[in-house]
Amino acid sequence: MSLTKYMWAAFGLALALIAQPKAGYAQDCTTKIGAVLPTSVDWGRPIAETAQFAVDQVNAAGGVNGCQIEMVLRDTQVDPKVGVDAAKALVDLEGVNLLLGAVSSGVSMPILTSVTVPGGVMQMSCCSSSTAFTKLSEEGKTNGLWFRTFATTGVQSAVAAKVASDQGFKSIAVLYKNDDWGQDMARLIAADFAAVGVEVTASVAINDGQPSYRGEVTEALASQPEALYLALYPAEGTAAVREWISLGGSQKMIMANSLKSDEFRDNVGLQYLGSALGTDTASPRTESADAFRAAYVERFESEPNGPGLANSYDAAMISLLAMQAAGEGATGAEMAAAVPKVTDPNGTPITADTEGFAQARDILAGGGTVSYQGATGDVRFDANGDVSAPAVVWSFNEGGTQEVEYLSLAEVDAFIGSLK
Amino acid sequence: MIQNLIDGVLTGSYLSLGAIGLTLVMHILRFANFSHAELLSLGAYSALVFDALMSGLVPTLAEKLAPLSLTWALIIAIPFSMIVTGISALLIDKLIFRRVREKGQELSMVFASFGMALIVRNIIGLIFGLSPQLYSKDIAFAMVLSLDPLILIKPDQVFVLVAALILMLILHLVLSRTTFGYALRAVAENPSLAQVNGVNLPRTIMYVWLIGGALASVAGVFYGLSHQLIPVMGRDLVLPIFAATIVGGIGSVYGAVLGGFIVGIAANLALVVLPSGYTPSVPFLLIIIVLMIRPHGLFGEARA
Amino acid sequence: MIGVLSYLVFFATTASILAIAVLGLNLQWGNTGLFNGGVVAFFGAGAYGTLILGGPPQEGMVGGFALTYPMALLGGMAVAGVMAWIVGLLTLRLRHDYLAIATFGVAVAFENLMRNAEWLAGGAKGVRGFERPFREAIGDGFLYNLVFFVAVLLILIATYVFLERLVASPFGRLLRAIREDEEAAQSLGKSPSRVRLTAFVTGSVIMGLAGGLYGTFYAFVSPQDVLPTLTFQVWAMLIVGGAGNNRGAVFGAFLIWGAWTISGWALSRFAPVEAQLYTGSVQFILIGAVIVGMLVWRPQGLLPERLIVSQQGSNPVNKRGE
């Protein structure tokens, strides 16, 4: 067969596939939204599950503007090329105006610059933490289409410093994931620990996908710290902490919220995590704030513990609320512009569940605004799409995690101010 | 420093086991098998299944052999897993590699193995989930050998090292004392000449896969015992194992053993010299240095 | 329909960029027999080089050279070339498996350096380069993508023509001569090591060109763009398309990238909702199966090399597989 024949055959096949009508939704009204998440990665799959969970709740409440939501999910394979292509396909072929994702900043960024901003599509990421997004936004290059529910690393790092100082630690070693989030955390935490007078004895990068972290752990151990700070994900966190404990390392640990995971607790063992304290952003102190947790436990039979789960839920929920607020047939820019209407601090508080969504719909229909009380707090975005939130200190227990201390937004801000 | 050295030797023991199988396959079948490390995953996960099965059938087997975190159930699971993995390696060869070998050239084999690695890794991920698994959730504490300088050794790792050395000794005896060993070396030297002299080539290839698979399975279990099981463990291990093979010289079993230890030690010692972010490059820098001095590895020989 | 068209243009742009890299590899492997396992390092050098050279000053980083675009792109290619020259001097005397692993190691070290050296390449958060060229004039919508695609396509064609000429030239014959029988070539007074180095550097510069275009298109590059997956993808394209044949190389690029993306798209569209979470793993299995299947079915590639013997009287063209 000649080259041209092959080409035409491939082209014809592609057209045939694209043109094939989607059966089954003839009479129902369906709105598609896109999601590009790394479903082939261990921590990525639960993030996608949680986004789908939020969509299911919204559908149970009757959908958005009377239409059921279909979340078209694509795997990024944590490969920017693949993620960008998937995003472009979702925008062009599925016609989505709203895109959830991605997780890694290195995938979210090219999607933002080459797909969503040019295409006028609203993009909401659960977990991309890079400061580069804030800069891009400050330069006015996101057209206000970019949002993320990942609280800036500054809050986590400051609260960790507060914990260290409250516990009276004199010295601490830092193990951090060697990606953009981890490098950011390591830099911030070093400054914050220094500000409260805790000596950082070693700051050790943990690379992804290494067969053994023995050498890294040995290095941290050799610096003889009183405690250990962990900015890791569960997979390498488990490996590193098991190694750390087996070598007789201190059980005084401070963990970033990425380790708030049942898998980590079970695999390391609760008996070794008794004096480990975690930091996280928190829901405000309202009774309704427990709604997300309760519904999650009912659905998945486990606590919503794991990196990015609460963020992913909020990302999906806020996007859909904004979609509702923007009205039928809204463009991505209109949805993005409607986000303040659903995260208005002066609006009616609504819960993070089916009832909350139904209630919000009525209020928004009457021209009101709502304050979404999300899984990560009463989320509010600043002009750059970044979020700030109250914080919590937690520890592991038999059932999952328990709260040790709650810091309101004002307290967090005051403490961060005192560090400078 | 001494601690890093010891850690390196202990890490080296499972790398060596993996590298032996790879070096045999690379030598006899003349292709870089990127799916070899998936045999480690396959072995580790099948041992997990047999382990659970044994502990379920005979609960007393699930007790730990203190101070190891090893159980009898897992020890019994190992030979089963070796058989399963060896046969899987053979099957993959029968179904895929042999067909590619008959039609294509060396490089087709390399990429077929790459494709196979993707398939095996993701099937494991579908079956067992993407999260890490452990043979035993208890943490086996390290023994303090010396306080100043602080030197710690985990009992499990000593067991792994001893067991690996015993396996290597057995292999050495097989290769140097049996007709099979001679046949293997003859095939490696010159396949056509060996066949003329009555060596059964297909059978030799079969044994190579069985041995390579079985050793890989043990290496996988040992790795799982020292660390954890994840579906992508093959991806994480394939490069150190290749490094070990290449440093030792393709085709040399003893080179593979030594290469495994060298790579293990280098990876652990690297932290003394370099910031930890750079550790993944170390095995490769080592390879490049070794190859600049000896272009065919430490024990490898040039061949047409 | 405009959506479909817009997507196809986007798809074809990425595929064309990858095709340029595959052409570079074809010069190295297909024509010269150099097993470069570190394609992504040279691709990445081009991308990082272009963005750093052409980008505005950024806090705490070298760079801010803000060169005009063509200069930045040429600079990126030069970075790839210089790196290839050094790597080539060190490793090219190694054969096949050894060379592959050594160059693979170079690629791992490159990614590692980019990930850790914040002063040089922004570290793990990557480099935000410059706005895409001519964006002000034509906006950044469909029209931009179309114009960019045409530009990439022209560069692809130029690269193709250049390589076809090169391969047909005496130098090309020399490359094949060395690939087939180094000693014979040497006995005719040729210097195989110099010729191999030239081919290696030229191929790497072409990969650097592809990387530069890639970085320009996304206006961003991060260590995630330079993982070994890309090396595998480019190789798979060459092997499936047909090593030694430039048309095969381009065709392979479109085919494999098509399979890679269509499989994800088809799964998201046709797999039941409950299975959606597992499609990532299923897609990898499909990709693996396609590659293995191709190699079992047609190991010489879809468009195999045409061996041209310049002597009159012998069989001029090997038609096998055409």
Image: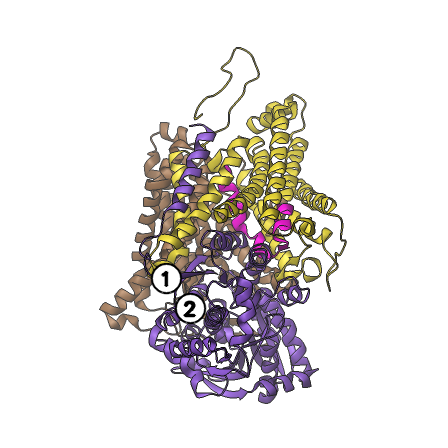
Chain colours: A purple, B brown, C yellow
Residue drawn at point x = 65 percent, y = 77 percent: A200
List x then y, in percent, for residue A239.
Answer: 48, 68
Instruction: Say if C60 sits above or below B170 in the image.
Output: below
Which of the labelled discs sits on residue A263, or is there none? Answer: none
Which chain is mark 2 on? A
User: A187 left or right of C281?
Assistant: right
Magenta stretch mostly in which secondary structure?
A: helix
Q: In the rendered structure, which segment of residues is drawn in magenta?
A: C211-238
Which chain is mark 1 on? A
Secondary structure under badge 2? loop
Q: Amino acid at mark 1?
A: Cys
Instruction: Say if A201 sits above or below A11 in the image.
Output: below
Instruction: Please identify the quadrant where the C terminus of chain C is shown.
Output: top left
Q: Which residue is mark 2?
A: A65
Instruction: Tell me the distance, in whole angstroms, between the alpha carbons under discs 2 and 1.
Output: 10 Å
Q: Quadrant of residue C112?
A: bottom right
Secondary structure under badge 1? loop
Q: Which residue is mark 1?
A: A29
